[in-house]
Image (tube, rainbow, N blue to C red):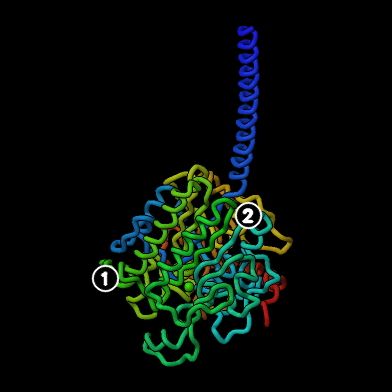
Amino acid sequence: MLTIVSEMISEVVSIKKQKMKIFKFFIALNGFIIFSACGQKDIQTPNVIIIYTDDMGYGDLSCFGNPTIHTPHLDKMATEGIKLSQFYVAAPVCTPSRAALMTGSYPKRVGLEKGVLYPSSTTGLNPEEQTLAEILKEKNYLTACIGKWHLGHQEKFLPHNQGFDEFFGIPFSNDMSKKEQEYMGRNNYKWRLPLLSQSDTLELDPDQTTLTKRLTEKAVSFIKKGKKTPFFLYLAHPMPHIPIYASDKFKNTSVRGPYGDTIEEIDWSVGQILKTLKEQGIDNNTLVIFTSDNGPWKINKTEGGASGPLRGAKGTTWEGGQRVPCIVRWPGKIPAGTMQRQVITNMDILPTVASFCGAELSEKKVDGRNVSRILIEVDEQLDDYPFLYYSKNGKLEGIRDGKYKLLLLDEDIFLFDVESDISEVYNLADTDPDKVIMLKEKMKRIDSLLATERRKVGNL
Ligand SMILES: [Ca+2]
């Protein structure tokens, strides 16, 4: 009897074990399916972080040749990703450059090519345009704009009405207030600079020495919150736009002086972002792009940044106005320690990111192109794609086509081979008049087409 009971118990236990085994198998299978699904999902939908500084020059980072400013985090980011040596922004000033980033188009196409917006402006990026944030919202991304917007400060133009779930920052430049203008020795403003959360004013004329740190903290908490779902973080530092500020921790620490302090704090900020990605286990699934909105502002000679070997600065169509440092990092996807030397522009970011994220563009025409291929396969060649230079007020001034650049400034005609003559010193216009004519016609043709396709700026 005991034997029979013992056998029965043993059988029940065995069945239970088998059931447990089957149960465990299904749990494992389920886990595998979930894991696989996540893995697949991860490949298709990386998190995206764009760090966009304000008025930082081509020569302001150690890894782009600065001899005195120390940027260890950005240098490391470059060794873990790809450096773009011929990266252009579509305008030499803030508003149009940001319009190009957000829409993948020339500022002229979206009606925002004529200078920057001011606290008195009633225009902004047309809400009818499809921003990068809106494209990613279609893929259920959690989106945040942290920092400076400058595409319209009226309610309807603010980030939370342009595809961003969250906005924390300033609506226009950090010098656009009476307090800051007086600090800079001027007395021509009546406005104050608001620090906004969505459209609510949290503070007026915030202490700008704390801005980089506060924005970084906001960005870090957004990353932690967004890690379970794909997220898009647009971190647009108001620095190093003049007036420059750094926190007490960085003040008087750089051998380059106050400007170096400011850049080194931004570098610290990048370090915090990358550290957070690692801590949250999402490092391999996050595409990070670091760049600047235009070249350095040489308003007070030494106060602004450096264009490095490039001629000119912010507000000009010389290379120093529009060619800026750019680093892209996505471990495991973009080869580490590489350099892409082909021309890429900030208009390319939208179609490229959309491609990486499997997102669809709308039917609205964009000027940027998907360059994802040459970020992954660095030796692949894309066809030459002419790039037009517009002045800070939206006037057509030049074209880059292959290695040549034609620049028309008032009555002066310049033709440079900007690959061998990076500093635009040797004018070839007289020695190659046929090329001048050809490029002039080409730039006018592209611009005329653009003019006929120009869409309306946003109006109140
Ligand atoms: Ca700027």
Q: Quadrant of the C terminus?
A: bottom right
Q: Is mark 1 within 8 Å of ligand 1?
A: no
State whether residue 137 appears in this view: yes
Q: Is mark 2 within 8 Å of ligand 1?
A: no
Estimate the x, y position of residue 112 in percent, counting from the top left: 61, 75
State whether residue 415 appears in this view: no
Q: Is residue 10 above or below residue 66?
A: above
Q: Quadrant of the N terminus?
A: top right
What residue is rendered at 58% in x and 52% in y?
Answer: 371
Instruction: Name the foreground residue: 104 vs 167.
Output: 167
Mark sitting earlier along the chain (2/1): 1
Instruction: Name the foreground residue: 241 vs 83.
Output: 241
What residue is rendered at 29% in x and 71% in y?
Answer: 251
Estimate the x, y position of residue 356 in percent, counting from the top left: 60, 50
Q: Calculate the distance from the C-alpha at mark 2 to the C-alpha at mark 1.
A: 41 Å
Q: Residues within 10 Å of mark 2 (few under 14, many from 20)?
A: some
Q: Nearer the viewer, mark 2 or mark 1?
A: 1
On the image, numbered disc 2 is attached to which residue? 354
Instruction: Name the foreground residue: 177 vs 69.
Output: 177
What residue is rendered at 31% in x and 60% in y?
Answer: 70
The picture quadrant where one finds residue 120 is bottom right
Residue 340 as seen in the image, left or right of residue 363: left
What residue is rendered at 36% in x and 69% in y?
Answer: 262
The picture quadrant where one finds residue 302 is bottom left
The picture quadrant where one finds residue 63 is bottom left
Q: Amino acid at mark 1?
A: Asn
The disc at residue 252 is: 1
Estimate the x, y position of residue 185 in percent, counting from the top left: 37, 89
Q: Amino acid at mark 2?
A: Ala
